[in-house]
Amino acid sequence: MKINSDWYTKGMEHIWLPYTQMKTAKKPQPVIATEGVRLRLADGTELVDGISSWWAAVHGYNHPHIVEAMKDQVEVMPHSMFGGLVNEPALKLATRLAEMLPGDLNRSFFAESGSVSVEISMKMAMQYFLNKGEKRTRFVHFRDTYHGDTLAAMAVGDTEQGMHANLADANSGNLLTDLPRTEAEAVAFKAFLKENAHDVAAVITEPMVQGAGGMIFHGPETLRWIREACDEAGVLFIVDEIFTGFYRTGSRFAIDQAGIVPDMITLSKALSGGVSPLSVCVATDKIFDAFYDDDPEKALMHGPTYMGHALGCAAANASLDLFEAEDYAAKVEVISDQMARELAPCRALPMVKDVRTMGAIGVVQLDDTVDLDALKPMFVDAGVWIRPFGTIVYLTPPLIIDEEDLRLLTTAIVKVLSSL
Ligand SMILES: *Cc1c(COP(=O)(O)O)cnc(C)c1O
């Protein structure tokens, strides 16, 4: 690996890397180019990407339709402020999202990162009640879940076991509980929510899959029970589809499988096709109407500098074109079947506790005897980019991956785990 270039050695003295113990971490790989499902490293090594750059690059890299749309936009207007001004890509994207999302999720509030869109959804929920004359500041959230790294988002993640357990606001007043997975748990959850409803603004969850918390699946009935519980208790329901949105679980949105409409939904990651930082919190008419008033105090006081980013929204519109042009649900089904088939042999390995797939998510759950950090270079040697975490080795490949490249990923997992 050629990691002695000047920009690398100098830069490594000044960069601070994500989720990284800088003292003990292995040196990161310098990536210099991307194409399709491949990352090219500085020494010319090409790796098939099993992660899609944190689940975002759904159409693969450098998709010509997205690149063209961005080139056209960047020459005309990369960005202009969203205060007092609007731009065509952002308004078009808002219109398209309203058409795609179920029910009356009609109002898009744009931001630049997933965590920020989560914060916005929480702020909307609190002010929704404030505008109606009620002060509610607590949130109900679930074990094993993850909603981002900013302060309020950390406080609705898994504050006991999650990566932010030590840092999440212990005084947030939020209520941590288990996702209801059975009829009996649903009854208990409904009672719990009713009892605490008076100062709870919203329940927040990831739908169908808890991603960063360990790729843990649940059924659509869980979402229906939470929706019912929220309706009965008069509490809002926020669904965070930052990971699951745009076909990752098989359906366009994970909530489509449950047939529910949350009061607010957050989207990011695949929203721009993985090329531009862009997120959105989409609210229903009911939420929007609580802010729509002659009273300036009832306005939502929020507005990120890069809100409605024209270049990012142009990329997102191009990404939506691609979703409309081809049957991505069918692509995901093919990926899902192949991963299920080809990861199945892992079940026979002694350290493997579970193998599961949902949509374009394939998971091999290990026991805690395996040193996951040791696996990372083994995957690079096998020609693939796979990043295990917690106790899982998982695949979230680009949704355009073909059979042969997907086989390289699954084969690498079987081979590396078999060699332990
Ligand atoms: C990644 C993620 C976030 C945070 O998004 P960032 O863009 O990293 O801030 C929030 N919620 C879920 C479910 C995510 O997967």
Image (spheres, rainbow, N blue to C red):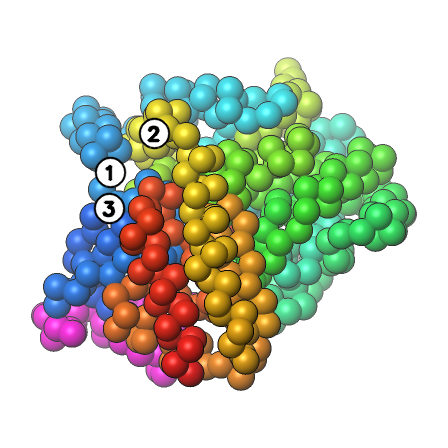
First in residue order: circle 2 vs circle 1: 1
Whole-percent x, y for residue 259 in the image: 67, 31
Amino acid marked by disc 3: Gly
Quote the CA–CA distance across marks 2 and 3: 14 Å
Instruction: Identify the image quadrant of residue 235.
Output: top right
Whole-percent x, y for residue 322 in the image: 34, 29
Look at the numbered discs 2 and 1 and tell me whether their residues touch, using CB distance below 8 Å: yes
Quote the CA–CA distance across marks 2 and 1: 10 Å
Counting other residues with Cα less than 10 Å from the Cα at mark 3, is it few (<14), some (14-19), or many (20 or more)?
Answer: some
Taking the magenta stretch, the answer to whether it contains residue 308 is: no
- Quadrant where the image shows the N terminus: bottom left
Counting other residues with Cα less than 10 Å from the Cα at mark 1, is it few (<14), some (14-19), or many (20 or more)?
Answer: some
Residue 280 visible at all: no
Q: Residue at x 59, y 51 (%)?
A: 209
- Residue holding disc 1: 63
Amino acid marked by disc 1: His
Residue 216 versus residue 288 in the image, above or below:
below
* Left or right side of 120 for 5: left
Q: Main secondary structure of the magenta part?
A: loop
Amino acid marked by disc 2: Leu
Residue 180 versus residue 221 in the image, above or below:
below
> Which residues are drawn in magenta?
1-28
- Residue holding disc 2: 322
- Residue holding disc 3: 36
* Label 2: element kind: helix
Q: Residue at x 20, y 34 (%)?
A: 64
